[in-house]
Image: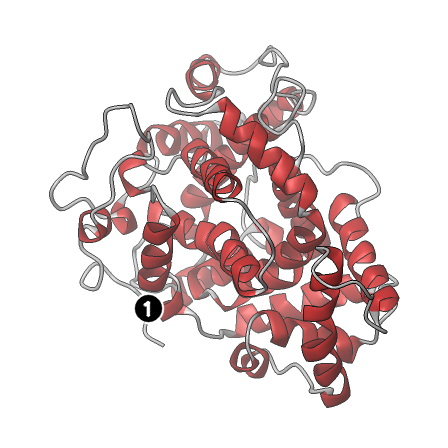
């Protein structure tokens, strides 16, 4: 499928009639004429990180930030003055963040964590490998050379967002998002120096990880998960759905996405996803290798199922088309079992049917093992710190 370009997407926010994520009761703003998320980056932070990389200060910054973990922690000492000033300004929730909604979202995450762990891991994680710009950026950046470490950092982001105290002083997501924003700025400076990345980059000369790219990632995570929960008829109240969206609105704001590009409703998110995510999904050599690395990492854990079952679950969650792109061998017995047992598993867990399906225990152990992989940050024995890279894939 063809990739998106400036010619295909002009003023994405304006085209969808989106307003600021500020919500009811707060002044909203429509996008400026001609605003385009594919040509919007994070100029202030990008310039800051380019300077720190050029002057060789990143190793010292990483050392200083290692102990900075929880939202309520004071900023680490010893940071360059410009970075200290940036974090003082941005290490906080936006003015429009609704703490009541964020607490409700945290409770929702706790109640639905069985499905979230699976969807984020086997769904969003594998989907990222068929998003060409994302797959190439991951593969040719420093993290692409060690996928277990890269997966652990990704799981850290997801875990911290899903934590019950994610946005509270005792939680860690605000800090994690700020560190990730700095990593993105470093990658935007470093990747264009990679001849391998430049050789395969769509629209040569483009800078990676634009606001548009981050929105695509959001839709492969939050919007995708919401859509699957609806398809699977997982009970959710309107307030829970709204709170779940709000937590993602805050998350992508903290990553540097301009408010005018952030969808305000699930209907707007679905429309945006259909425009910016669905048309670009396709396979690349880099993506196919990353998918095998990720599934191989998952297979290292005793999930209580065969690799064929794992492949078929990916096909069930994403599609057979994506499974074919990634050359996942078929296991038709496992496919038939999943199609019948998974809906019954959900129905029993949600109290919609009185009798557990025959395969309930097997599926429950499978999901519990995936959850432990998620909670253990992709198999890392300790919490994997998010560090700013100083180079590309060796």
Residue drawn at (53%, 33%) of the image: 177
Residue drawn at (58%, 61%) of the image: 233
Residue drawn at (52%, 59%) of the image: 230
Q: Give the x, y percent position of residue 77.
A: 60, 10
* Quarter of image, res 279: bottom left
The quarter of the picture where the C terminus appears is: bottom right
* Quarter of image, res 71: top right
Q: Secondary structure at mark 1?
A: loop
Residue drawn at (69%, 87%) of the image: 330
Q: Residue furthest left?
A: 33
The front one of 189 and 167 is 167
- Please indicate, yes or no, whether residue 232 appears anywhere in the rendered image: yes
Q: Is residue 212 above or below residue 50?
A: below
Answer with left or right where residue 140 lies relative to residue 147: left
The front one of 333 and 216 is 333
The front one of 43 and 89 is 89
- The local crowd at label 1, few if under 14, some if 14 to 19, many if 20 or more residues have their Cα within 10 Å, is some
Q: Give the x, y percent position of residue 85.
A: 43, 13
Q: Give the x, y percent position of residue 6.
A: 21, 58
The front one of 41 and 186 is 41
Answer with left or right where residue 294 lies relative to residue 381: left
* Quarter of image, res 328: bottom right
The residue to which callout 1 is attached is 3
Answer with left or right where residue 265 lies relative to residue 300: left
């Amino acid at each position: 499928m063809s990739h998106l370009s400036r010619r295909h997407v002009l003023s994405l926010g304006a085209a969808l009639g989106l307003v600021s994520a500020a919500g009811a009761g707060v002044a909203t703003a429509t996008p400026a004429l001609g605003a385009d998320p594919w040509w919007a980056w994070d100029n202030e932070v990008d310039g800051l990180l380019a300077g720190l990389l050029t002057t060789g200060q990143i190793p010292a910054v990483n050392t200083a930030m290692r102990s900075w973990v929880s939202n309520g922690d004071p900023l680490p000492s010893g940071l360059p003055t410009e970075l200290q000033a940036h974090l003082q300004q941005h290490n906080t929730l936006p003015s429009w963040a609704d703490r009541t909604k964020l607490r409700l979202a945290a409770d929702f995450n706790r109640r639905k964590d069985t499905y979230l762990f699976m969807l984020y891991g086997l769904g969003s994680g594998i989907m990222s490998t068929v998003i060409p710009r994302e797959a190439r950026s991951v593969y040719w950046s420093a993290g692409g050379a060690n996928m277990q470490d890269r997966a652990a950092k990704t799981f850290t982001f997801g875990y911290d967002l899903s934590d019950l105290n994610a946005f509270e002083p005792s939680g860690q997501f605000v800090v994690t998002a700020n560190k990730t924003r700095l990593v993105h700025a470093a990658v935007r400076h470093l990747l264009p120096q990679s001849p391998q990345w430049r050789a395969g980059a769509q629209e040569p000369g483009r800078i990676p990880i634009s606001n548009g790219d981050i929105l695509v990632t959001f839709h492969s995570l939050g919007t995708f998960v919401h859509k699957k929960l609806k398809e699977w008829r997982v009970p959710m109240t309107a307030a829970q759905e709204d709170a779940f969206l709000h937590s993602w609105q805050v998350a992508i704001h903290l990553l540097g996405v301009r408010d005018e590009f952030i969808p305000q409703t699930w209907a707007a998110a679905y429309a945006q996803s259909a425009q910016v995510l669905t048309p670009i999904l396709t396979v690349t050599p880099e993506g196919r290798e990353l998918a095998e690395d990720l599934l191989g990492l998952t297979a290292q854990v005793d999930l209580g199922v065969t690799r064929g079952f794992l492949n078929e679950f990916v096909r069930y969650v994403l599609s057979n088309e994506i499974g074919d792109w990634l050359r996942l061998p078929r296991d038709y017995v496992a496919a038939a079992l999943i199609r019948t047992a998974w809906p019954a598993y959900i129905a029993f867990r949600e109290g919609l049917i009185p009798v557990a399906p025959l395969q309930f225990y097997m599926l429950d152990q499978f999901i519990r093992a995936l959850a432990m992989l998620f909670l253990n940050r992709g198999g890392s024995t300790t919490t994997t710190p998010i560090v700013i890279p100083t180079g590309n894939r060796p």
